[in-house]
Image: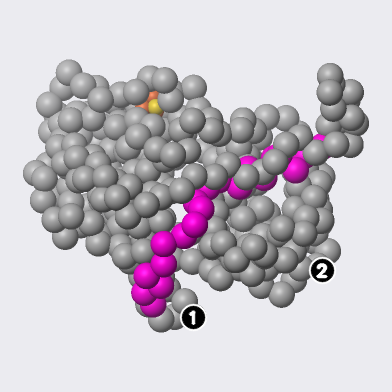
Amino acid sequence: MTKQEILDTIELRQSTLTTWSACALMYKFRHIDKLEPAFRYPGTIHGSALHLVLSWLHAGQWKGDLRALYTKALNYYLYASDESHIPVRWKRDMVKEIEALKVNAVEILENYRSKAYNKEALVLFSEVPFRVKMPRGYRFTGTIDQVRKNPDGTIELLDFKSSKQRPNRYAIPNDLQLSLYVDAIKRGELLVDGMWVKPNMLVDFAGIYFLRAHEVYKRKVPGKEIGQEKSSPFMRTTKTIQDLRVFRTEIRHQLSAMVKPWYYPNTASCAFCTYSTHCISRNDNLPEKQANQAQELLAQLNMA
Ligand code: SF4
């Protein structure tokens, strides 16, 4: 594929960047070949459902029944979203796992809702689509989880995370996704009530809101009590105009690499990869045309 063909095929979204950073081959499968993942993780669906409930809470349902709201959101991602036809890889009994997700969601959401800093925050944008131009005319699109005005007047951009492991705090200042969001609010446009608006706003803080920090200790551990929340959810950084300039230069370099048809596997990501079946069946030693012909023949024999 030529550089222009790759550019015409990929959609420059925040997920394109994160997939590229995880594994160039995964990026090829997902964004160039447009292959679907072989399965979905329950944890990913849980995270999407939590995001949706948080947006509902701040859009007038603050006092809503958390279990009912979460169940509605979970059912949407399980049975009604664009990806609901992709099987979920349950580890054990599905009914028991769904119940465990609901219990976990209510624990996280109840503690989120109990905090004055969340209750008193004025949410300016929630799950808001954005678009922003990058050097050489490339345009990135995506969705920002939340931008809020804190009770002390500071403006903060938050990316909600619900992975089991707390993100590495040393990686936050260099997180490309966060820089992309901050740049989008400063130089790009947001889709608000069906209209593209330019906030032209430099946020005071940008960071990750680690939702699982609201989980509570179920057993006694040194220095912590049973029932105590695990930690603070905020993992903040700041971005200056100069930081955003540096970010755009970095994006330009990343993009030049992304449009070259070389896709080096990053096996550090294989253990969690939802594209591993596509990956195992690839053959790097055959020319692409021959490999496609072989795949077609296998498909005719129901063996692909
Ligand atoms: S299995 Fe490993 S090398 Fe293959 S696409 Fe996934 S992460 Fe990349």
Q: Position of residue 139 (x, y in %)?
A: 25, 60
* Residue identified by numbered label 2: 63
Q: Ligand 1 within 8 A of label 1's CB?
A: no
Asked if the stretch drawn in magenta spans residue 213, the answer is: yes
Residue at screen point 50% across, 51% down = 206
Residue at screen point 30% across, 31% down = 25
Q: Is residue 264 left or right of residue 60?
A: left
Q: Is residue 228 above or below residue 198?
A: above
Q: Quadrant of the N terminus?
A: top left
Q: Is residue 43 above or below residue 187?
A: above
Residue at screen point 34% across, 23% down = 266
| SS for callout 1 | loop
Crowding near the residue tagged with mark 1, few <14, some 14–19, many ≥20 C-alpha atoms within 10 Å: few
Q: Amino acid at mark 2?
A: Lys
Magenta segment: 197-216
* Residue identified by numbered label 1: 193
| SS for callout 2 | loop
